[in-house]
Each structure stands twice: as C-alpha cells, then as structure tokens.
Image (tube, rainbow, N blue to C red):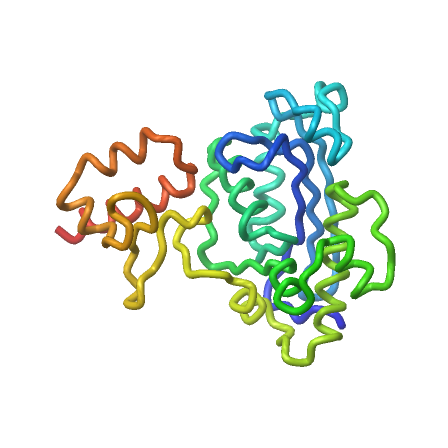
Amino acid sequence: MELKLHRPICFFDLETTGIDITKDRIVEISIFKVYPNGNKESKTWLVNPTIPIPPQTTAVHGITNEQVANEPTFSELAPLVHTMIKDSDLAGFNSDRFDIPLLAEELLRAGVDFDMKNRVSVDIQTIFHKKEERTLSAAYKFYCNQSLENAHSAEADTMATYEILKAQLDRYSDLENDMKSLSEFTTRKKSVDFAGFIAFNDKGQEIFTFGKHKGALVEDIFEKEPGYFGWIQNADFPLYTKKVLTAIKLRKLSTK
C-alpha cells in the first residue's frame, strides 16, 4: 500500500557514537523523502562526530574513526539536512525516543532552530511493538519476507523502515493511511519535550516529570522559584528541553 500524504515525509536513521542523547554524536545519517505526488529522493552522509567512536559502538555499525576523519562535521551538514526535512513529517524506527531527540540536539547545537511544530512523527517500531513485539530485522522478515542485509547501516535501516510501514498498512486494516493518525497511534505519552522531562497534564498544562517538582506546573515553579530555570539552563539537560522551558518562561512573561 502506498502512503497517503498531505505533505512530504522523511524516513531517516542515525548511526551514532553511543546512545546518550545529550553527549553522543551522529556518525552517519540517511534520509529517504517521499512526496505526496509519489516522487522520492534520498541522501546519506557519513559525519565526522568530532569525538572518538568507541570500539564497542564500531562493533555494532561498522563505522570507524578512520572512515569519518575526513568527512564533514554535522555543523557543516546541518543546513543540508534541515533543508531536506524542514517541510516534512518525520518517521523512523525507534525515532520518537532516540533519532528525533538526538537529531534535534545536533541541529540546535549547529544553530538550526529545529522543532516539531506543524509536523508529526510516526515511529514504525511502536506500530511493530504494539502489533508483534520484534526488532527491525525481524520486522523486515515478518512484514516483507526478506532478510535485512547490512543491518545497522543507516541507509539499509532507513529503506527497510519505509518498506515496513507500507507493509504494516497492508496487513492491519485498522491502521489509517494518514500520517497524523499514525503519529497518534505511535505516540507513547504526551510529552512536551523529546526527552520527557516536561509533559502535559489532563488540562493540557505543562508539568515537570522529574525531581522535587514532579507533577508541578512549570509556570508555577518558575514563578515561585525563579532560580530553578537558571539551574536547568546550566545543567546537563537536552538543548531541546531547555528550548521548551525558555518558550514557556517567555510566554509567561509576555502575559504580565
């Protein structure tokens, strides 16, 4: 089944130096863009992460420090990446919990003002886990009846993810072929930032999900304890979380 699209959607996958969203860096990124008219384009870049790739990570994706030593840094690639995705919804395998948050950190670090306003994300892993409980390679075998060659290659994983979503739509008649609907189906919780430090309560108000102010309204805490905002901005929180909290603080100030 081909996708019904109201705007382009970018399937993407990252290979990285590790799994820490705030500290690790991209070493490979592959983007496969599908347009509403059926046109497609793809780009894959190796990236110099500017920090060492640990041997245990190289053992997973096969990318060595020597391979990326002369490749562009993400800061150099950021304008190209942003141009490709800025008009698009996003999709990936475990993308809501890892790829999108890490990509957001890299873009913000490069000075690109990335956010998810006016777009949705579809996490194909969540569809798979809600329906079958498997890994990407098993999903590709299950839905597409093919073995995934070059697993943990960003390009191979990206293309497999695209094919899996189409096969999932063929298999499950209750899945609507609409990116907004699929985004809602794959959303695990209503968080405001990618990392889940800020969430919405039942009234749609932003609350903290951690620490001594867990469950408290963000605006209330910033009003009662102004230094808490400064502490977060100077602590080791994701850049996107800091961006969200800054927007909440500025919104509150503008109403005074």
At a point 42% along the width and 37% down the height, the residue shown is 239
At a point 55% along the width and 49% down the height, the residue shown is 86
Q: Position of residue 30 (x, y in %)?
A: 70, 43
Q: Position of residue 158 (x, y in %)?
A: 73, 50
- Rendered view: 27 above or below 158: above
Residue 205 in which image quadrant: bottom left
Q: Position of residue 45 (x, y in %)?
A: 71, 35
At a point 25% along the width and 47% down the height, the residue shown is 213
- Rendered view: 177 above or below 243: below
158 sits to left or right of 84: right
How many dots with numbers?
A: 0
Q: Position of residue 142 (x, y in %)?
A: 80, 64
At a point 68% along the width and 31% down the height, the residue shown is 57
Q: Which of 133 and 115 lies nearest the eye of the viewer?
A: 133
Which quadrant holds the N terminus?
bottom right
Q: Which of 18 and 219 lies nearest the eye of the viewer?
A: 18
42 sits to left or right of 95: right
Q: Which of 28 and 207 lies nearest the eye of the viewer?
A: 207
110 sits to left or right of 63: left
Residue 14 in which image quadrant: top right
Residue 232 in which image quadrant: top left
